[in-house]
Amino acid sequence: METTADQIVFLVVYGAAGLLVLLTLTFSFFTVGQQTAAVTQRFGKFVRVASSGLNFKTPWIDWVAGRINLRVQQLDVKVETKTEDNVFVQFVVSVQYFVMPEKVYEAFYKLDDPTKQITSFVFDVVRARVPGIKLDDVFQKKDEIADAVKGELAQVMDDFGYGIVKALVTDIDPDAKVKESMNEINAAQRLRMAAGEKGEADRILKVKAAEAEAQSKALQGKGIADQRKAIVDGLRESVAEFEKAVPGTSAQDVMQLVLMTQYFDTLKEIGASSQTNTILIPHSPGNLSDLTAQMRNAMITADQVVRPNSSGGEPKSA
């Protein structure tokens, strides 16, 4: 019986010792993930910062007080402020920050809530700069505002072990009534521009039409002048041939004969047409003489118009 009791005590002691050794080994090692840092303490006092991988600590007296994320994180801060022209605007500022690996101690012990700290500084910078800028300029100067936020945060947060990658003004949202009025102003400006362009297009069309009409009139006048010149040249040739064929006949006699022939041909055409109105024409011998004289004078005038001047220049005007 004594032997059995001794064996039980032996087994219990060695079992407890083995368990203690196992627990000691278990609590001596710990792992840290990638882009993460672990802070170890001994009796509440900082010991060291453990990097990623398998790490050793003194069992039973050291423990992992906390872990710090070393990845870049983003915080979106909404800020409402007033512009120089008394328009309330809501900004969304996105701040990208990270814990510097060499300053894990400062980030863990000096700052309890980094997001609140960053938010406070974003509010301070935005509300200090925007009231001096008009609403129309806010959209153009959003990069300047973002740079100011980054510069202020980078200087302050460096003491707490945090680095600032970028600060971005991702949204600018004026009051709904202000946005509606801005849209109306923009629409009115575009309508005014469209009206100006339409007026310019109409002006160009009218100018082109006037130029085309002027060119058409010029060509039409040239055609009429050429036609009259051809008629005069034809009559001149007819008179010359008639004088050759009938000796003793003067040019005046031939011209009167030609004019009378054309006159009777015209009467024939007027009488043969069914679409003409009634025309009363003097037909006494005296009137025929006057008509011949008028036609002769007209032909002489036309001949003077198309005849070149003595210096070889353009035809003389009537």
Image: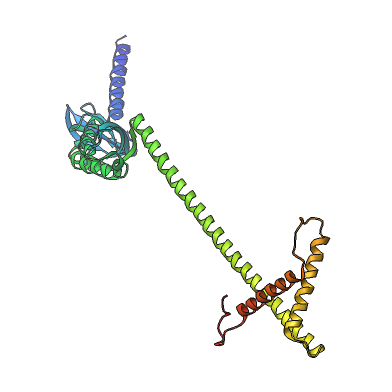
Residue at the farthest top position? 1
Q: Quadrant of residue 164?
A: top left
Q: Position of residue 2 (x, y in %)?
A: 29, 10
Q: Quadrant of residue 67?
A: top left
The residue that appears at 40% across and 43% down in the rendered structure is 189
Number of numbered tags placed on the structure image = 0
The residue that appears at 46% across and 46% down in the rendered structure is 195
249, above or below 201, in the image: below
Q: Quadrant of the N terminus?
A: top left
The residue that appears at 23% across and 26% down in the rendered structure is 60
Q: Is residue 217 visible?
A: yes
Q: Nearer the viewer, residue 173 or 101?
A: 173
Whether residue 163 sits left or right of residue 259 in the image: it is left
Q: Quadrant of residue 29?
A: top left
Q: Position of residue 86 (x, y in %)?
A: 25, 33
Q: Nearer the viewer, residue 227 or 162?
A: 227
Whether residue 42 sits left or right of residue 176 in the image: it is left
Q: Position of residue 75 (x, y in %)?
A: 31, 34
Whether residue 78 sits left or right of residue 254 in the image: it is left
Q: Nearer the viewer, residue 232 or 256?
A: 256
Whether residue 157 sits left or right of residue 72 in the image: it is left
Q: Quadrant of the C terminus?
A: bottom right
Q: Is residue 227 visible?
A: no
